[in-house]
Image: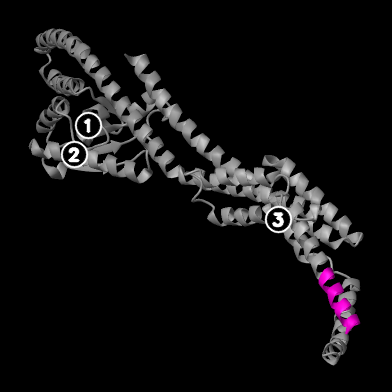
Amino acid sequence: MNISTSSSFTRTLVVLAVSTAILSACATAPMKPAGSAEVRAKLSQLQSNPDLANRASVAIKDADAAVRAAETPRQDEPLARHLVFMADRKVDTARALAETSLAESQRTQLAEQRETARLDARTHEADTAKLQAAVARADGAEQKLDAEKSRADADAARANAASSQLQASEQQQRAADLQKQIDGMNAKVTERGVVLTLGDVLFTSGQASLQPSAAGNLNKLVTFLANYPDRTVMVEGHTDSVGTEDYNQGLSQRRAEAVKSYLVGQGVGPIRLTALGKGEAGAVASNDSPDGRQQNRRVEVVISNPPAAAR
Amino acid sequence: MNRTPRILLQARLPLAVVLIVAGVLAGCATVPPPAENLRAAQQAIANAERVEAGRYAAADLSSARTKLASADAAVTEKKMTLAQQFADESRAEAELASAKTAVTKANAVNDEMKRSTGTLVEEMKRGSGDKQ
């Protein structure tokens, strides 16, 4: 009986000692491992960043779990260091992934900004060119007036001289008339026929509708076609290389059609007219400079050379 | 009163022996190398190399390689826990190298886009300055 009591007492003592030891162990190691607080701060910064917190959510969750493991107080110091290291790298990785996702999502907007800038530049270019053309037109009109006066004098003189050579002069006169009309239209005689070039300032920028200023030049063409009913006309639209090929093809076609329908509206038989969009392929100048692109944006009206008149 | 605990004690004795023997056996049995962790680290390093992390996050990639070598060395010394930790750290470093590379490349693309837009705007401003 005595022995039994003493043994039970001893057991109680042992239990007490053990539990005290366990409790004291817990009491001496409540400290979070070194470095874990810094990693937690880094993670919190990422999680509170509104641009990044909702991106790379799997990686952030992973990092969060790693940080929690790193914060747990441990007796095994190498293990604690290892876990802090892991958490640190995972937080950095999560941030890099979130930043990548953010950068990628910004691209749509950047592409739109670039497109807007490109359109602005193009409109601006056209506006500037329009202004220059207006100034040039004013100069040209003055010069043309002088030239026509002297040409009229010359014609009169030629008519006088021609009275003796009636047959020769008749043909000469016809050629002179043609040349005069061609000159009046600012057209050029080429092997394809007489080519009249309408610059893109005669169109609303990026569109196919004709500006009122185009009427002057086109009306001369109408008169010319009325005088030479045997001639047919090819209306060719051209653009520069800015924008997609499809867009440019469509724009050039619409511009050519606009010129054709204007001419039809002025009484030119539609059967004599062909409208053709040539897109950006028929460049006459380099597309690398604004001036070159300006020259490439145009509509060419090619008046056929009939075999008889070509001579 | 006296007998009961003794019977219980006798019944528990074999159980305790079995437990102790099992524990000793488990302790003595060779722990296998952390093959899965080592493979994952190698894979992560290979991925990082493929995305050119050597160019964009050289320090992290090099640290990943060093830690993988340390893991292999720990396996040779039969320090399997250490080997597993080195392998995991190597993998984390390699994954960080890949992520840093990705963010550098993504930002470079965006910068280039911003630059070309800026050039267009600049060109337009200069153009109007020349002509007016």
Quick check: marks 3 and 1 in contact, CB under 8 Å?
no
| Quadrant occupied by the C terminus of chain A | top left
| Between A216 and A178, the one nearer to me in the picture | A216
Q: Is residue A7 magenta?
A: yes
Callout 2: helix, strand or loop?
helix
Measuring 59% from the left and 54% from the top, which residue is drawn there?
A: A59
Mark 3 and mark 2, same subunit? no
Q: Which residues are magenta?
A: A1-14
Nearest to viewer (mark 3 / mark 1): 3
Measured Cα–Cα span from mark 2 to mark 1:
10 Å
Q: How is the image coloured?
A: one colour
Magenta residue check for A186: no
Q: Position of residue B53 (x, y in %)?
A: 68, 45
Residue behind mark 2: A258
Task: Say above or below: A228 vs A93.
Answer: above
A276 with respect to A282 (left or right): left
Identify which residue, B3 or B49, lies in the foreground: B3
Which residue in the protein does label 3 denote? B44
Query: In whole angstroms, how far apart are the C-alphas of marks 3 and 2?
Result: 62 Å
Q: Position of A11 compared to A91: left or right?
A: right
Mark 3, mark 2: which one is toward the viewer? Answer: 3
Do residues under tags 2 and 1 come within 8 Å of each other at their CB atoms? yes
Give the residue type at disc 2: Ala
Chain bearing tag 3 is B
Residue B63 showing in the rendered view: yes
Of mark 2 and mark 1, the one earlier in the sequence is 1
Q: Amino acid at mark 1?
A: Phe
Give the residue at mark 1.
A203
Q: Disc 3 to disc 1, how far (Cα)?
A: 60 Å
